[in-house]
Amino acid sequence: MDSFIIEGGVPLRGVIEISGSKNAALPILMASIAVDDEVSYANVPDLRDIHTTIKLLNILGREASLENGVVRVKNGTLGKEAPYDLVKTMRASVLCLGPLLARLGEAKVSLPGGCAIGARPVDQHLSALEKMGAVFDLESGYIHGRCPDGLRGAHIRFDMPTVGGTENVLMAASLARGETVLENVAREPEIVDLANFLIRCGARIEGQGTTMIRVQGVERLHGCSYAVMPDRIEAGTFLIAAGVTGGELLLKNCPIRDMSAVVDKLRAAGMIIEETPEGVLARTGENGLTGVDISTRPHPGFPTDMQAQFMVLMCCARGSGLVEENIFENRFMHVQELVRMGADIHVTGSSAMVRGGRPLTGAPVMASDLRAGAALVLAGLAAEGETRVQRIYHVDRGYEHLEAKLSAVGARIRRVKDAD
Ligand code: UD1
């Protein structure tokens, strides 16, 4: 297992290019299952989860490979089983369920287990697909779905706006017979990106980005070339890196239009964030950082995937900030590690009170999940002294070439094997 060793206290200065979005790329790659011909994707980040998805597509009979940010997926005879060994390493594997059912009338996908940030069930995915005519059995840890007569359009109202549920059903509905109306859907930009990809392949979808999506099913989807949107969570993480180190970063290819909730809070906390023709320029204003409150919500609210990183900004701010997590239970595992670095944070239920202004000091810490790991890297960059972030395989799931990008703007960060 690898760790990062970070010598903190260096203001980061320079230019960072934002990579393609992991959370957009995963469903869009999975959607190739629903497409008849060859598909080519640009701006795909070189990440562990992407490699897992490519492996899964190959197991499912596609011929998929990643080279220089481009993934090509070729036709092959589709298989119907997503095995436990892959699904256990990446929950998003469950996104193959909808397109497989639509194409083959049958799918067998290992049931994703609980993960570090909560139970994360898939009941909404299954009940929606049931409404479209699928029948599910749970057999030896696998969800076995069948719809021998194909999927039919349906009127579906989700109990909560689920990102993965909306994506799974959107792919299925594109090939179902007749019209599907999806209500109370998630509105995340990554869902809009998936819908745009499907439309490019011939799907008939309206309403993406709003709470109701209408899909008229088509007979088949044809191949296309598509560029994945930039990663708004990676971009948000680098904005905070500029803030907590007292530096100045120019982010190229930054999807700021999809980042209003985060950018508003960063500005309220004292950061100067400007759109320039070259990219988005970020630094802390003359009066320094002050505490603000955040409360995570489905898009367009403050994203849960930025909560841990924002907490580090609050640790570096004057005054206090209340951080409320409403999407996932158990998503405060970074708190104990930040406290080990000198932070003053008290958790009560789903809220964390951060009292800022105490200097962070380097310490050995452990990443428990992707965004918690990113937060610890930010804390390490802000802290005096050396921080060792262990279990960075979590961070590798979602940040492309993180240490190279940070080193290029002055950070003292290196990757070591844990035995070192
Ligand atoms: C996606 C993102 C993840 C992000 C999350 C919320 C990907 C690959 N992952 O995860 O980074 O943190 O959106 O923005 O895009 N729920 C149910 N039943 C279901 C489905 C969801 O109860 O069938 C609950 C979950 O437990 C959670 C909430 O709904 O509390 C939101 O989950 P969901 O939006 O589905 O998140 P993911 O798609 O798993």
Image (cartoon, helix red, strand yellow):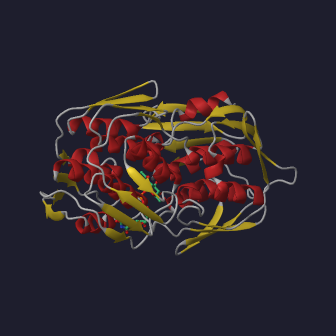
Image position, residue 174 (x, y; %)? 33, 52
Any part of residue 362 in sight: no
Image position, residue 249 (x, y; %)? 72, 38
Judging depth in this view, the residue of 247 and 166 nearest the camera is 166
Rendered-image quarter of ligand 1: bottom left
- The residue lying at 12 percent from left, 57 percent from top is 148
Q: How many marks?
A: 0
- Quarter that holds the N terminus: top left
Judging depth in this view, the residue of 310 and 299 nearest the camera is 299
Image position, residue 394 (x, y; %)? 44, 45
The image quadrant that residue 85 belongs to is top left
Q: Is residue 28 left or right of residue 291?
A: left
- The residue lying at 77 percent from left, 66 percent from top is 319
**Where is 377 relative to 303, above or below?**
above
Image position, residue 385 (x, y; %)? 67, 41
Q: Is residue 114 left or right of residue 401?
A: left
Judging depth in this view, the residue of 201 and 64 nearest the camera is 201
- The residue lying at 21 percent from left, 53 percent from top is 101
